Image (tube, rainbow, N blue to C red):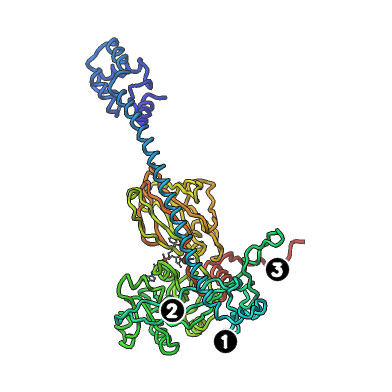
Amino acid sequence: MEKKERRNLGSRLGLSVISPAFSPEELMQESSDVAANGSPNGTENGRLETFGSSASTLSSSDSMKAAYAYLPQTPIRSTDAHLIEFSEAMRTVAKALRRVAEGKAAAQAEAAEWKRKYELEKARNLQHKNEELEHEGCPCCMNGMLEDSLNKLTVHDASSDQNECCGNHGICSHQVLGDEAPAPIVNSAYKMVTRKASFRLSWGCNGEKNGQHKHDVVSFEKGDITTASRSNKQILLKWETQPQTVFIITKPNSSEVRAIMPEMVRWLNEHQKINVLVEPRLREELLADDSYFDFVQTWEDDDDKKLLHTKVDLVVTLGGDGTVLWAASLFKGPVPPVVAFALGSLGFMTPFHSEQYRESLGNVIKGPFSITLRNRLQCQVIRDAAKDELETEEPILVLNEVTIDRGISSYLTYLECYCDSSFVTCVQGDGLIISTTSGSTAYSLAAGGSMVHPQVPAILFTPICPHSLSFRPLILPEYVTLRVQVPYNSRGQAWASFDGKDRKQLAPGDALICSMAPWPVPTACLVDSTTDFLRSIHEGLHWNLRKSQSFDGPPA
Ligand SMILES: NC(=O)c1ccc[n+]([C@@H]2O[C@H](COP(=O)([O-])OP(=O)(O)OC[C@H]3O[C@@H](n4cnc5c(N)ncnc54)[C@H](O)[C@@H]3O)[C@@H](O)[C@H]2O)c1
Ligand SMILES: Nc1ncnc2c1ncn2[C@@H]1O[C@H](COP(=O)(O)OP(=O)(O)OP(=O)(O)O)[C@@H](O)[C@H]1O
């Protein structure tokens, strides 16, 4: 190795260059260079210069040898030894801190999971209670005619209500969402006093609305395990009482939306006798155009806004996918069914055509209609700096994905990922996308993830530009809890963003915990989940579009 190279190597390693990297002969040569030129030959190294200046006072090879012999005791070497010892001690402390943070994050993940289970259990109990109440008045149960009632079960025609089974035998009823009475609100802008409509969700087999309904996913007859038909059930929503309040959400600054919106509000009010609720901005816009819209309601403050789900029967969006994401973000808990009209460019989650809004809304208000239950992820940021505080940041619900990326940092992101208590991997690259199946056609798709039908119960784990040849995206089951941790030895910070919004900085030691939220977004289908999904990937993404081969036949 060349002298200069070794000197640079020594300095890069943080060691004094007056070290075994130089032989006594080379040092003597160095010394005579110094004596001749007043400075060490061609060096940029401060330490060597320091030595050179002291060595320059010695003129003989004896004094050089003496200096060399003195080296092992130089303060520089002993300082290095201390530094090494100190850095090792620091590393041990960092390791211990990391273990503590990991323990805390794991405990928090567990707590989040218990909370989720608790919410589910609560919802289930509520459902049972509702079912018991309904059970009392159901003629088919009083007669004990379970088989008959099964045959009578139909969700096709609302007029057949009287003859239907109550569905309390665990056969068709999936869930009855709350029928909560809203708190009375007296201000003029927000004066709803109506009860929220109730509805029932049921599974139709093979996509047939009146197909036979099955409850069990798995049965254990005679010790054999068999699975019931489960993967092709289309969920149907059937109103039990008439919907009364529609919440219209619009994409801002769109002339197309501005043209259709007042017309729709009028039609809902005059032809359907339905209350209309909008965001405060939109109410102002409507009133600025015409005082006729004084009946349109809105909310006054955040407390009112939090109660939206107890008052709204139906959400209508006018815009693109971003407007559906926006609508979902307004509901931090349960979400009413969403009817999304396409007024954007792509429209993966917006199957309805705005020109036909009368027919589409008329059908939905009458019911029954097919819905897709789009799962959302619940994301919680756990700050290392706040590890001693009891309060944690508000969880954020995402319909598409949470992305952890390098933001403006030019370093690779370095993220440690855990699934429940198992280590998954370290992400070194631009970042990581944790996506729902609805989000599988959004950013995750752009990063190489699979497109997944929104009704598949899964979480996608898709790296963004990983600096590794073998980092394929994963699809995990929906019941896991994922934890992404920025390690203490990460070179930079990371940034989390939620459905492409609300960027949050993650410092080394911070963690993000994600699990499936108990509140999906029910979106109305134009046809059914699968038809709508396939139409979106064909029309929106031109999936697998290729010119067909000519029919010339194979060469003879
Ligand atoms: N490289 C990328 O593809 C990339 C980068 C950043 C964000 N995004 C996506 O944009 C979303 C935010 O959407 P926005 O409308 O508020 O921002 P935006 O206005 O930047 O639009 C992003 C595009 O993504 C499409 N999109 C959104 N959700 C989709 C879904 N579930 N399936 C298919 N396409 C979808 C939208 O139609 C739109 O064309 C994020 O959740 C993220 O998924 C994608
Ligand atoms: N009610 C709203 N209030 C504030 N911002 C909204 C609202 N609705 C939508 N947005 C935002 O406006 C932006 C554009 O909305 P959207 O994606 O629906 O329209 P688009 O970009 O025309 O459609 P596409 O994405 O299909 O091209 C998104 O960033 C979205 O978050």
Going from N to C along the chain, the mark reached first, 3 or 1, is 1
Spot occupied by residue 338 in the image (x, y as percentages of width and height): 46, 74
Split into quadrants, the picture shows ligand 1 in the one at bottom left
Whether the residue under disc 1 has CB within 8 Å of ligand 1: no
Residue 96: image quadrant is top left
The picture places residue 262, in percent across and down from the top left corner, at 38, 84
Q: Say which of 392 and 20 sits in front.
A: 392
* Residue type indicated by callout 2: Lys
User: Which residue is disc 2 drawn over?
Assistant: 196
Q: Is residue 366 visible?
A: yes
Q: Is residue 539 visible?
A: no
Instruction: Kindly identify which numbered label has been placed on residue 551.
Output: 3
User: Relative to residue 187, is residue 174 depicted above or below?
Assistant: above
Q: Say which quadrant the N terminus sits in.
A: top left
Q: CA distance from mark 3 to mark 1?
A: 53 Å
Q: Are marks 2 and 3 in contact (CB under 8 Å)?
A: no
Mark 3, secondary structure of its residue: loop
